[in-house]
Image: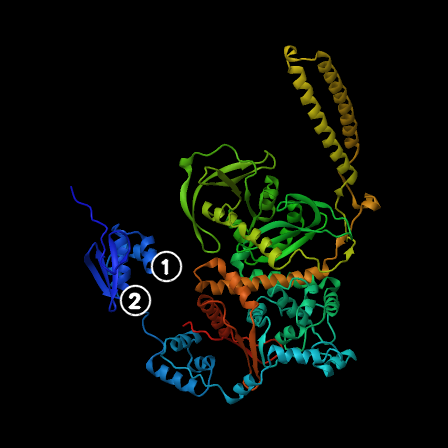
Amino acid sequence: MPQPLLPIIPHGATPINEIISVVREEGQWTYFCGIQPVFQHSEKDRRSFKMFTAQLCVQGACSQAQIIRTFGVSKNSVLRSVAKYRQEGIEGFYRPRKGRGATIMIDEVTTEAQKLLEKGLSRKETAKQLDIKYDTLRKAVERGRVQEPVVESRKQMDLRTCASDKSSRSDVDASTALDMGIACTRPDERIFAAIGLLTEGATTRFQCSRDVTYGGVLCALPALAENGLFSHLDSLPVVEGYYTKMHVILLLAYMALCRIKTVEQLQYETPGELGKLMGLDRIPEVRCLRKKLSQLSREKAPDRWAAILSKEWMEQRPELAGTLYVDGHVRVYCGKKTKLPRRYIARQRLCMRGTTDYWVNDALGQPFFSIERPIDHGLLEVLRNDIVNRLLKDVPSQPAAEELKSDPYLSRFVIIFDREGYSPKFFRQMWEQHRISCITYHKYPKEIWPDSWFTETEVTMPNGEVILMKLAEMGSYIGSQKDGLWVREVRKLTTSGHQTSLISTVYSQLALKDAAALFSRWSQENFFSYMMQHFAIDALNEYRTESIPGTNKPVVNPDRRILDRKYQSVKSKLTQCQARFGALTLKPESDVKDIDKWEREKADLHQQIEQWENQLNVLKEQKLKTPKHLEWEDLPEEKKFERLSPSRKRLTDTVKLIAYRVETSLAMIAREKLSHQGEVRSLIRDLFQSDADIYPDEVNGILEIRIHTLANPRSNCAIQYLLDYLNAAEFKYPGTDLQLTYILTNNTVN
């Protein structure tokens, strides 16, 4: 019988466990099993370290947790080393890395790039002159093959020396308070605007400024332009005065990205600091901004602008526009201007007054448009009358009539919604009339399928994540004989044994695609939650109401609602009395101590039951005579209500949708450098709310934005990667010839 090893380790060694220990001496790591050395390598030899620790884990000499605790390495690093050892063995750690082939930066190009940089040319100018990619030159600089001079021009150094700080700007802004108002440092332009001589609004003129509040939001400008913030502004009414149409729209975008959720909150922000972000002396005050928003919201102009942008967003990503998610969201109204109908709010499990908005999003949760319903008749009604007709016009890359005729299983696009939209008649109508496919949950699934039918399948979600699901599929007939149809039924088997059933009229694709599409509905739910928390999508933008135009839809009869409530109350009381009477009747007389009292209780209950039954019959007759719905004209005047004024909210919500899409696009770039994907939106928010230095260079046509360093090197690395991406876009600030250049200060991350 073998004798077990005693827990003995050499003097001065660090124990990994009771048997394995390690000693670090003179730049060498020596590993011991008991008191016998078994392996040694240099402390700089990372390959040998990973190989031997992986070998110890694979052979069972120690656990992965012990390696992580002893050497302070990351869990992912140990997991990768163990996986490599199991797959490739020892040779896998010492195999030469594969090269990338011939490089563009040959010696001649490197020498020429060094000369151009020393002459004062920027990286972009050098890359353009040498006809190479900007990223190629950037990587050569980062790896030290090309040395970039750090000496600044005399003029730029003078600009930074004379740049103002917050204290000096605060003194200047306060000095104008008694004249034209705080931070009104351009009196000539304001006077010209007041007498109507400033036809094109205030000029965009930046000043050298340090530590500008919310300066990081300038990083969003290229993405704002790409998502259409400055496009089709001619569809909005003309705004005259000091602040132009672009100033107002850009300010709304900055507010959304910096989490200034309402116009009223601007009174708590420093107007001069926000003005520096826009090349102005200050932003408009709250009253002025409200007036500008009212001017821009005339004649349903925001609806036209939002419709144009929605169609463009679909055309930019036709692969995402082919699968659309539709869901309703209730905006709660607690005011007293009007008594809106009550709606059931699932997130609060209450019936509250509000307006229902039906949103159309893509598979990543990005919004396309929404439709307001002050009088709501459900998801199917808005799908039939509004959403489907609009999608038939706007969704790009729809198959032609010949393609649909030649392929009987091909559809135009796919609509996905929850159980509220379950209707076999609707599914059949959409397929036969428009060739539109629908996917939703099966509202009435039949018998349980055997577990042996399910197969574990890798499902790729729209965001690229791969998930293992147990899926099974078969054809099912749903609905009546007249209005029903055959559909594809797909079920997912959960670990608890529950079967989630979905039905699909997408006859041309596989079960895993249906599952990936439907189970991505969480992206739209997350969109609602995120927009409420961070963009105040439910907040009121004005406190006005207006009549509901063209109201030709029936509304719930308030008298019928009162009768229904009374009927349910009486029915509940009748049921209670019947239950008590039944309990007394079934009770044996031998168990009754007081027969007279028992008889009196039965008689009283019998009398109450007769009374409640009579009331129930009366209410039933009244319900039969009272219609469930009334036309709007037949509704009593005291019962009529108005809707919340939608014009200004439509404008601000459109800007918020652009801001959300901008944040999403920037997050998708920065996530490439983050190991924890859940942190990326928080990082982008921190970037927008961070301070920055602004240095305009009119001679060279550059607007330099120096972002202050963030909390840790990991965040700086991701932000630097994002800034390099933005610099490559070579975006010019709207209305100027200044090209935006972004720099992360004190960045030591290579």
Q: Residue at x 64, y 43 (%)?
A: 349
Q: Secondary structure at mark 2?
A: loop
Of the pair 1 and 497, the residue shown nearer to us: 1
User: Which residue is labeled 2 in the image?
Assistant: 98
Residue 510's disc number:
none
- Label 2 and label 1: CA atoms lie apart by 25 Å
Q: Residue furthest top?
A: 590
Q: Amino acid at mark 1?
A: Ser
Residue 74's disc number:
1
Is 622 on the left-hand or right-hand side of 311? right
Asked if one can make out residue 508 in the rendered structure from this viewpoint, the answer is: no
Of the pair 241 and 161, the residue shown nearer to us: 161
The quadrant in which the C terminus is found is: bottom left
> With respect to residue 595, does 279 lie above or below?
below
Could you say where residue 728 lies in the image, as x and y percent from the top left? Answer: 48, 74
Could you say where residue 224 lies in the image, as x and y percent from the top left? Answer: 58, 68
Q: Hey, which quadrant is residue 34 in on the image?
A: bottom left
